[in-house]
Amino acid sequence: MISYEITGGVKLSGKIKIAGNKNSILPIMAACLLTKETCTIKNVPEISDVDVMTQLMQLTGAKIERKDKSTLTISAQVVTPADFPQDLTQKLRAAILLLGPMLARCGKVRMGHPGGDIIGRRPLDTHIQALVALGAKIKEGDFYDGSAKNLNGADIFLEEASVTATENVIMAAVLAAGTTTIRRAASEPHVIDLCQFLNKMGALISGIGSNVLTIVGVKHLKGATFAVRPDHIEVGTFAILAAVAASKLEMSPVIGQDLEMILLTLSKFGVKYKLEKDTLTVTGSKLKATEKVVTDVWPGFPTDLIAPMIVLATQAKGVTIVHDWMYESRMFFVDKLLSMGAKVEIADPHRVLVYGPTKLFGQRLDTPDIRAGIAIVIAALTATGKSQIDKAELIERGYENIVERLSALGAQITRIES
């Protein structure tokens, strides 16, 4: 188990480099199974989810090498059907992204149920609906058993605008015969990254960035070199940290278009920022509550920032309603904040009322999931006294070298491995 010891109340300042997008790198890695040629991926975040995806892909025969801290080379010249075991898939929700590529490349796949954060129901119905529409057969039981003699293009309306289901059907469709149209497709920045990478490999995808994608199947894909875009969720996380615990924080590189709803929401809280080219600077802010923060499908406010946003609301004057309709367990981490002195009422599994500003105090806490974990880190840095955050390995699934990066800003944080 990994724990963080944090002494809060110290104002942070400085510059921080934004890592590559966590939700981009995992489908991009999976897409490398679609070609026999070598792919080089740059700006790869150093996170444990990448390590688990590497282990899964190596079971197929793929050769993966980290050339330096931020570059991967992936060669899938020979790929054979593999059983992806439960002990690995349960560590990674994104393991499901191997379904589409393996069906396209090998016509067969078997995997244990994917795991990941426990934040509510995360059914795979949309994945199965879309892949079956392309001609796959998928049996559900203790494992997911998929097979496909031939994949053929289809007109698909997704049951929900699921990011990973959109990515799975894109990867299956690029080598399918004929044309595939995906309606109600997810359009998040990481979906854009995957589409742009596949097009560099020779895929024919149009409508990128919209909710309707058209894919003309090709017979072969080639190798490509691609740089993962900066992680907008990480930018939002550090912007929230800056608003509650820093005098000035400069973040780069950023893509302004990826931050529009995040910055709009922060501005309603009175957060002061400046966006210039690829740099976002947030300065100390006098925070005021806003009426409501509600998650939505892209380009709405992202669910992955709801937990840090609740921490920000504890430091804002007034009452804020925070509503995440997507996941019924996202809010349950607030009991950690209550033990630190926060005033939060759980209205129902999807909504909380946050009263601020409240003074937070150090506490010993467990990490429930990646995003709640980083929210607790932000709370501990804001709090008076010492905190210990256990099960911090969950945070490291999604945040690269977080202890070193926060220490460089002046945070009093220590990583302990037991």
Image (cartoon, rainbow, N blue to C red):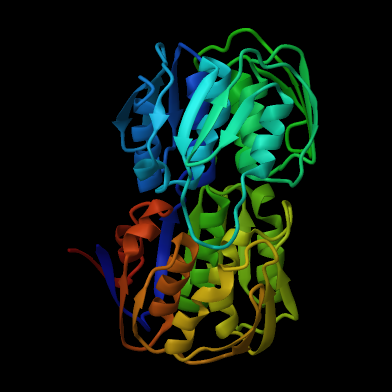
Q: Quadrant of residue 218?
A: top right
Q: Residue at x 57, y 48 (%)?
A: 278
Pick whichever, 306 or 165, lies toward us: 165
Pick whichever, 98 or 382, lies toward us: 98
Q: In which quadrant will I find the N terminus?
A: bottom left
Relative to 33, is 323 on the left or the right?
A: right
Relative to 323, is 70 on the left or the right?
A: left
Identify whether 58 is placed above or below 329.
above
Q: Position of residue 306 (x, y in %)?
A: 60, 67
Q: Position of residue 296 (x, y in %)?
A: 73, 59
Q: Position of residue 225 (x, y in %)?
A: 49, 22
Relative to 177, is 330 on the left or the right?
A: left
Identify whether 152 is placed above or below 142.
above
Q: Residue at x 33, y 71 (%)?
A: 411
Q: Position of residue 222 (x, y in %)?
A: 53, 12
Q: In which quadrant will I find the C terminus?
A: bottom left
